[in-house]
Amino acid sequence: MEKDIFKEVAENLVMVLPEKWEKVCLYCYISDYTYQFSFHVKIGGKYIQCFNLEEVYGISEESVLECFDKLHDILLPDYEEKKFFVMTYILENSGKFTTEYEYNDYTKTSIAYIMDWEKKYLV
């Protein structure tokens, strides 16, 4: 069942990625009350934050937000089962993907957590 969930995640992400993407790192924070998603896509060896894709690639913020709504619906059952704090989903253009779960709640230091997340995954 998990493979199907992550296949759906990939299908939805690919719809909002530029043509020559190499890799995408998706940050997923879900709680019982809210959610926050973001991704960085690697193109030409450099990562671009999802909300900066419109300027160069014409991928609208509205399209990205719609993708995040769909991803929330897809991933909510996984969150309800595992009760993770953050899930990181990494997809390569070859179709290979990995997921990592973080179970410690870093809400009080979320800015520092996100900065550490970026240092870890966007290399």
Image: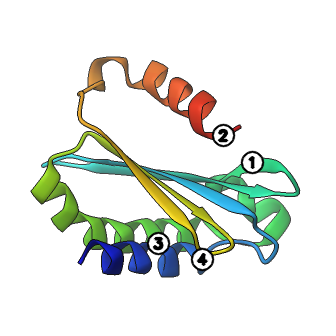
Task: Choose between 98 and 21: the one closer to the eye.
Answer: 98
Q: Amino acid at mark 3?
A: Cys
Q: Amino acid at mark 2?
A: Leu
Whole-percent x, y for residue 32 in the image: 13, 49
Residue at the spot x=82%, y=48% of the render?
A: 46
Disc marking residue 122: 2
Binning the other alpha carbons within 10 Å of mark 1 as few (below 14), some (14 to 19) or many (20 upward) gives some
| For the residues bearing labels 2 and 3, Cβ distance under 8 angstroms | no
Vertical arrangement, residue 102 with respect to residue 19, above or below: above
Vertical arrangement, residue 59 with respect to residue 116, above or below: below
Sequence-wise first label, 1 or 3? 1
Residue at the spot x=54%, y=72% of the render?
A: 13
Disc nearest the viewer among 3 and 4: 4
Query: In this figure, which residue is indicated by the disc labeled 4?
Result: 14
Query: In this figure, which residue is indicated by the disc labeled 1?
Result: 47
| Cα distance in 3D space between marks 3 and 4 | 10 Å
Disc marking residue 58: none
Secondary structure beneath label 1: strand
| For the residues bearing labels 3 and 4, Cβ distance under 8 angstroms | no
Sequence-wise first label, 2 or 4? 4
Q: Amino acid at mark 4?
A: Val
Sequence-wise first label, 1 or 4? 4
Task: Choose between 37 and 97: the one closer to the eye.
Answer: 97
| For the residues bearing labels 2 and 1, Cβ distance under 8 angstroms | yes
Sequence-wise first label, 2 or 3? 3
Binning the other alpha carbons within 10 Å of mark 4 as few (below 14), some (14 to 19) or many (20 upward) gives some
Whole-percent x, y for residue 66 in the image: 45, 73
Sequence-wise first label, 3 or 4? 4
